[in-house]
Amino acid sequence: MKKGFIDLNPKVGEYSYKCEPNMIFENGEEMEFFCPACKVNLKSEKFPKFVELLLRVSSSVHFEMLFSRVFGDKRTYVITEDMTEKYGDNPEDLI
């Protein structure tokens, strides 16, 4: 298993990254992502092919972000209680 730090582009829908140490990934390869602070696995329980991030802006404003754990699968979803925004190459409905 390869281990390293991946610095993902923070802009939603952009899929560039930097990796330390430098690694080559194969399209279709499933990746594991862990929080660098607490080491928790970020794999979504509801959508196991995705990483799930829960972002809280305030006590009343929060949203969920999902992005594919499969290398080369460029799909990202930003989910609020009102809507789901889809980014990437041919994103499908998750819900």
Image (cartoon, rainbow, N blue to C red):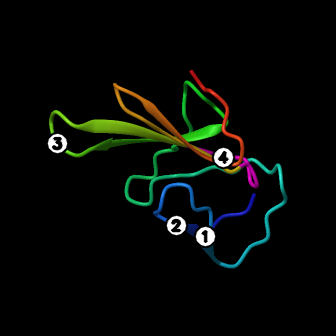
* Residue 75 pos. (x, y %): 64, 45
Q: Which residues are magenta?
A: 67-73
Tell me which numbered mark, 3 or 1, is placed earlier along the sequence. 1
Tell me the tag on residue 17.
1
- Label 1 packing within 10 angstroms: few (<14), some (14-19), many (20+): few
Q: Secondary structure at mark 4?
A: loop
C-alpha span from label 3 to label 1:
28 Å
Name the residue type under label 1: Tyr
- Label 2 packing within 10 angstroms: few (<14), some (14-19), many (20+): few
Quadrant the N terminus occupies = bottom right
C-alpha span from label 4 to label 3:
27 Å
Tell me the tag on residue 48.
none
Q: Which residue is mark 3?
A: 58
* Residue 17 pos. (x, y %): 61, 70
Tell me the tag on residue 69.
4
Name the residue type under label 4: Arg
| 49 lies above or below 72 | above
Q: Secondary structure at mark 2?
A: loop
Q: Secondary structure at mark 3?
A: loop
- Pointer 1 with pointer 2, Cβ within 8 A: yes
* Residue 66 pos. (x, y %): 52, 41
Count every numbered label the image shows and give the total.
4
In the image as oriented, which residue stretches furthest toward the top?
95
